[in-house]
Image (spheres, rainbow, N blue to C red):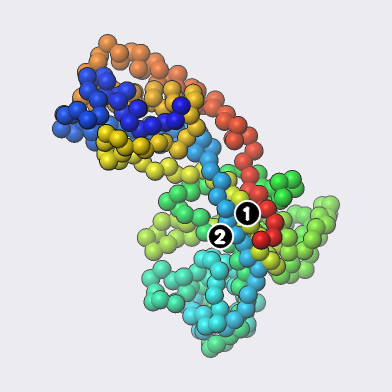
């Protein structure tokens, strides 16, 4: 059964002898909205994979052009160069650093920022950028979940950062990062410039909200289409979603989840000053405890081994 907001709302309002469309007491609708959103957040925190979706992103190969830079500064202005995404890797002539570049959130149109200050000579310099980073919407994506598979079969290594990649405890084809890293671990012999590892970076936008970057390594030599499994931050229900005829559905599976969500919503609604069905309070409290236990042991099929799948060249 789909989790329709009106259906859940009417189950709550039945305990004060009302339904959506009735003349509700002042403040009752807002309290009901808060109760539904509180229930939704409780489910999301306890079982993030319940709010799992697959989104498609694209990593792109390198491109070259020129950029205006100044020694010791992070501000820059690309000329015949288009960084494919915020946070993508860039190497600028005169400085061997594998830097990152992003749009300057506080600058003028066309101005960019480097992650670390440029160490070469001031002026117009040749530069190479790679589309190795894709920004995920921080208002939609809570985090990337699970294992990472190449072509749905071969696992990529999940790392914490680029330094992890550069100091990997295995032999890698590091492509444009430099020579292959070798140690005592068995060598992984794969095609150079094919994704072998992936990690999640963060940076801040103009409003200081964290944004997430999925980054692959080695630096891609071509274009790769990637399906990323993420735990989403679901849209909150609003008062407009609880008007007669509205069709807002909560983005979680149906079936027994309906019963869980209904129990949470009734419990939070029962704490309102409008709740009048005292005879039902004991049953509502017990149903809430049962729902919490179900969430603690909830294992949707999609939770087993979430993934990021690299589909191949596009």
Residue at left 32%, top 23%?
11
- Point out the residue furthest to the top here: 279
Q: Report how far apart the C-alphas of labels 1 and 2 lie in the structure.
A: 10 Å
- Residue 83 screen position, x and y as percent: 55, 72
What residue is disc 1 on?
Answer: 226
What residue is disc 2 on?
Answer: 134
Residue at left 26%, top 19%?
15
Nearer to us of marks 1 and 2 is 1
Badge 1: how crowded within 10 Å, few (<14), some, or many (20+)? many
Asked where in the image residue 304 lies, by quadrant, the reply is: top right
Nearest the eye: 56 or 92: 56
Residue at left 44%, top 60%?
204
- Residues under numbered marks 1 and 2 in contact, where contact means CB atoms less than 8 Å apart: yes
Q: Which mark is residue 154?
A: none
Helix, strand or loop at label 1? It is strand
Indicate which disc, 1 or 2, sits on the residue closer to the N terminus: 2
Badge 2: how crowded within 10 Å, few (<14), some, or many (20+)? many
Residue at left 48%, top 60%?
203
């Amino acid at each position: 059964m789909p989790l329709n907001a009106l259906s859940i709302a009417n189950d709550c309002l039945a305990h004060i002898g009302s339904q959506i469309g009735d003349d509700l007491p002042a403040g009752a609708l807002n309290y009901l909205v808060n109760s539904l959103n509180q229930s939704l957040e409780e489910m999301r925190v306890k079982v993030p994979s319940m709010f799992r979706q697959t989104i498609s992103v694209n990593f792109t190969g390198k491109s070259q052009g020129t950029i205006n830079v100044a020694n010791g500064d992070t501000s820059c202005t690309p000329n015949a160069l288009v960084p494919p995404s915020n946070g993508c890797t860039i190497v600028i002539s005169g400085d061997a650093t594998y830097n990152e570049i992003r749009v300057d959130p506080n600058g003028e149109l066309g101005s960019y920022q480097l992650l670390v200050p440029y160490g070469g000579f001031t002026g117009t310099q040749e530069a190479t950028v790679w589309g190795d980073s894709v920004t995920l919407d921080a208002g939609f994506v809570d985090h990337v979940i699970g294992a990472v598979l190449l072509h749905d079969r071969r696992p990529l290594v999940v790392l914490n950062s680029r330094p992890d990649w550069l100091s990997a405890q295995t032999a890698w084809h590091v492509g444009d990062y430099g020579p292959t890293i070798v140690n005592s671990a068995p060598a992984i012999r794969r095609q150079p410039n094919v994704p072998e590892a992936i990690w999640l970076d963060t940076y801040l936008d103009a409003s200081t909200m964290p944004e997430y970057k999925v980054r692959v390594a080695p630096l891609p030599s071509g274009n790769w289409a990637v399906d990323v499994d993420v735990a989403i931050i679901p849209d909150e229900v609003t008062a407009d979603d609880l008007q007669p005829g509205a069709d807002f559905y909560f983005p979680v599976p149906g079936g027994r989840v309906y019963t869980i969500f209904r129990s949470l919503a009734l419990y939070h609604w029962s704490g309102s000053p409008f709740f009048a069905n005292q005879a039902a309070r004991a049953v509502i409290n017990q149903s809430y405890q049962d729902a919490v236990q179900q969430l603690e042991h909830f294992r949707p099929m999609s939770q087993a081994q979430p993934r990021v799948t690299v589909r191949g060249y596009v």
